Image (spheres, grey):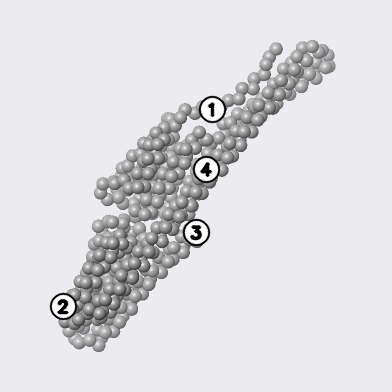
Amino acid sequence: MNIKSYLKRMSSQMSIFAGIGTWVMVFGISLYWLQHAPDEYKDNSVFITLLFIIYLVCFVLITRERLIKKGHRIIYFILTVQLLSAFTLLWFLPISFLPILTIIWVTILPHYFSVARSMLIMLLVVASWFSLYAFRWQESMFLSALLYGSFHFFAVLMMYHVRIAEDATAEAQHLNTELLATRQLLAEVSRQTERTRIARDLHDLLGHHLTALIINLQVAGHISDGEAKSKIDQCHSLAKLLLSDVREAVTTLRENQCLDFRKMIELMIENIPNMKINTNIDAQLNLENLNLAKSLLSCIQEALTNSLRHSSANEFWITMTKIDNSLHLELVDNGQTEGEIVKGNGLTGMTERTVALGGQLYLDKLQNALRINIKFPLPPQITPTMELEETSL
């Protein structure tokens, strides 16, 4: 985990501890108040303590990272139970500072709802809370409602901006990892292009000159005799051996044009926190597949981002294989996908990239987790050859 991910995680943990600490203060003061309260309140001490514990358990559950998928029904259930426990405490305790519990509750809303919906829910909760308090304890709470309502509004607004900052950080990290992988891809292309240039120069210069030398040595061997012919024949053999070595070197340089796709994937995933990523890359790409490599990197990055944002997954698998004349990429995690699969901007963008290169994208579920299968056709592999044949006279 890099330093930025560590600091982000520590900040999140500190926010949770702050919420728990506030709960401890409210709970402790409430227990102190109960010790000096009339017997009609003391008789409900056990029930009141249970309500406080239920509220705390719900808070801990709802703030655990990737415990439950965003938008899942269980989120609404836990939020409802937590809020009902606070309202029930209001019914049994005439304590004016109990709205602190609903302030803690509304800070969770921007993580699961839009800011407009969070504000609407907050207004309904504040109005219901102080209306119920006035009805139950026959006490006017108009000024307190205005005061605590402003605290609720401030809490929701601040947490909304925190969420925006987190999303911006995640997007920046997304772009940075894709940039690193793209830079590695360009570096590979540059190296392979240089290899091709060297091979071409060897073929055009050294190869042709050696061929001309062999021809001249053959001619010289035919018009000489004795010791001179022996030396010429020896030079002729050495020239042919050197030509063979050049031919082999040129072929090796030409054929060794594979892109290190595994290295690009490693650069992309090395700074992703709280996610175990397994890779199985059993296919090679070369310079002719440059656009395909770019598209594959973008699809993998988008799938990882979707998994981190919208899934409870903590493990991800990347499998790439070559079958016949097609390349198959499978992306799957161990998260939960409820209901019908709906394509958002991410999946739509992946589909567009795939179709643009003549590929196909399939979506299905594996043990209730989203699985993405992408198939790209590969052009026939034409192995470049450098014909440096000697001429026999």
Mark closer to the chain start, 1 or 4 = 4
User: Which one is closest to the eye, mark 2 or mark 1?
Assistant: 2
Amino acid type, label 2: Phe
Amino acid type, label 3: Asn
Amino acid type, label 1: Thr
* On-image quarter of the C terminus: top right
Q: CA distance from mark 2 to mark 4?
A: 68 Å
Element type where label 4 sits in the image: helix
Disc 3 packing (10 Å; few <14; some 14–19; many ≥20): few
- Determine which residue is flagged by label 4: 185
Element type where label 2 sits in the image: helix
- Determine which residue is flagged by label 2: 135
Mark closer to the chain start, 1 or 3 = 3
- Determine which residue is flagged by label 1: 383
**Eyeballing the image, is 332 above or below 212?**
below
> Which residue is pictured at 43% across the width and 54% down the height?
171
User: Which one is closest to the eye, mark 2 or mark 3?
Assistant: 2
- Determine which residue is flagged by label 3: 2
Where residue 273 appears, as percent x and y from the top left, is 44, 56
Q: CA distance from mark 4 to mark 3?
A: 23 Å
Element type where label 1 sits in the image: loop
Mark closer to the chain start, 2 or 4 = 2
